[in-house]
Amino acid sequence: MRSLIVIRCQITTFIGLRSGSCIARARKILSFSDAQWIYLRQGNRCVGSVCRSLSERPDPRRGGGEGGMKRVSSHVSIASEAEINLDLSRLLIDKPRLTLERKRSFDEQSWSELSHRQNDGFDSIMHSPAFPSGFDSPFSLGTLGDPHPLVNEAWEALRKSVVYFRGQPVGTIAAVDHASEEVLNYDQVFVRDFVPSALAFLMNNETDIVKNFLLKTLHLQSSEKMVDRFKLGAGAMPASFKVDRNRNRNTETLVADFGESAIGRVAPVDSGFWWIILLRAYTKYTGDTSLAESPDCQNCMRLILNLCLSEGFDTFPTLLCTDGCSMIDRRMGIYGYPIEIQALFYMALRCALQMLKPDGEGKDFIEKIGQRLHALTYHMRNYFWLDFPHLNNIYRYKTEEYSHTAVNKFNVIPDSIPDWVFDFMPCRGGYFLGNVSPAMMDFRWFALGNCIAIISSLATPEQSVAIMDLIEERWEELVGEMPLKICYPAIENHEWRIITGCDPKNTRWSYHNGGSWPVLLWLLTAACIKTGRPQMAKRAIELAESRLLKDGWPEYYDGKLGRFIGKQARKFQTWSIAGYLVARMMLEDPSTLMMISMEEDRPVKPTMRRSASWNA
């Protein structure tokens, strides 16, 4: 057996686990049962058990003692005892479904077989990525074999998009398309667009650009936010910003856009959520809690949450939104309670809950978040979820039901169910609806919202499996020749004219109306890894690799199968490039998923207190 080496942060494991004999010998040394070994190799965070087992057992070839174990290098921080002191047997009971259940995508090749043959890093045990500082990326070191030729091209293109402010990198512009005559706002740094770029830089150990971005957008939040003489809420985050250079005075200033310059004049709701999610990812990956704990960041989170948690007339825990306030930034009939915003809202609340200080104002917000999460989780999992049994129930709904005993609580008319749903819905599988509001259910499938639901654990383990079953069953419709359809199906004919306002960019199977977006590849990959289906992610990445560089990294693709480059798509779209890099790096090292993924939120058991008469 080869010697033991350090992998990533606190975990030490075998580098030589690439043959059946090595695996058998390793299991014999560690005395792991079949269930424990499967659980550990699929990447859970049982790092305490692994580290203790490896450190306590001697290397039989070297005659025991500490000489058979290579110590963790000094530049790697060790996780706190509270984080790594996990009980393996308890975790096996808590999460058997996602780790022990055989998936259809494993039929061709198992997770372990794939990792041994491809050397893609699936052997790595999932660890808390809170202490990886000092490590180089898989691509810079080449420890996982020669990278795909497309990787170097992608990194070169991504670096060309970096924006500098007073000598410091602060983000990446939306696109570097020199062939396009119309620049519009593609030369700006968008908050939502920068997230995949930030994750790629974090994974490559380039953390400064992410920290600078978080600080600059934080300070822009305090800028004056006026749209046609109307002042926006204090917590609103900018959709984008640009560096304004005055060459005569030799000065640079940041100019933010809060929606006052956007097409349709719509302020982004998702920017604040992405900012909180990225702050947690930065904190998890670097282990640097000082940024999140700083007064400015604490105040920024509170301002964002104040906009979302304010009491009003709404009877639903979901967040009421206007059309065009998210990634789908043009009119597409998503006003109300779109799944994308609700999933991001849920994830941002959970991220903030981990980072807010429980003192002063923070304590009040923590209580509000807990109450909202409880109601939001129930609402989304029950009313937004659709599978075959739920569809059959809606098909048989009675209308005009009154009182709290009503089954059809939103008074949805069964005749409003579109015909395509009955053919689209497989017997196995399900997804979160696009929108639910009084007398309306948007049955369209939206990629970002469903992937975020899996990553954030808004979806239960069973629902996560069902979403992946649906994608696998409807691969041609949702993935086709270029991952991934932003929504399905497209709106056509008279309905398109009414809902989109005859938007020429959102014609059927184009742009937001059923177009295919390469940036969604990283979200699909994250969902695949979390649900134990790396082969699906590998298949999607190979599809993208066959075309992205050749086509010039387009913003989106058109057509039912994503066969054609988008009619108005920019080339060298930054988040298409970054989305590919993040997907590839996650596949190489699934442990990186932990900085963006969240485990299922389990309610805390109430403390049992003794009565005053206990000792009487």
Image (cartoon, helix red, strand yellow):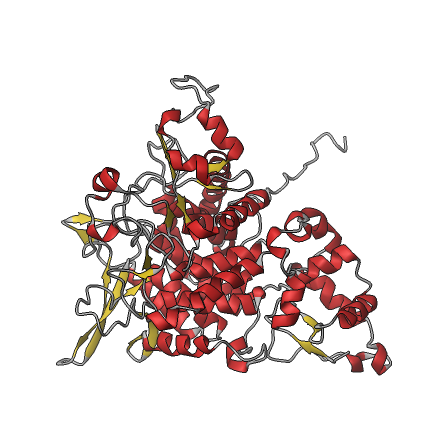
Task: Using the image, determine if residue 164 lies above or below residue 310.
Answer: below
Residue placed at 35% from the left, 33% from the top? 314
For the C terminus, the quadrant is top right
Quadrant in the rendering for residue 338: top left
Q: Nearer the viewer, residue 107 or 153?
A: 107
Q: Nearer the viewer, residue 50 or 562?
A: 562
- The answer to whether residue 85 is seen in the rendering is no
Q: Residue furthest right?
A: 63
Can I make out residue 451 in this image? Answer: yes
For residue 230, above or below residue 37: above
The residue located at (45%, 37%) in the rendering is 423
Question: 556 or 262: which is nearer to us?
Answer: 556
Q: Position of residue 582 (x, y in %)?
A: 46, 67
Q: Is 355 positioned to the left or the right of 125 in the image?
A: left
Residue at 17% over, 66% down: 182
- The image position of residue 596, as x and y in percent, is 50, 59
Percent x, y for residue 127?
A: 62, 64
Q: Nearer the viewer, residue 548 or 260?
A: 548
Count of numbered tags = 0
Looking at the picture, how far across and down is residue 599, in whole percent? 57, 52
Q: Quadrant of the N terminus?
A: bottom right
Q: Image quadrant of residue 591? A: bottom right
Q: Is residue 16 left or right of residue 353?
A: right
Classify residue 82 as left or right of residue 310.
right
Q: Is residue 568 above or below residue 609?
A: below
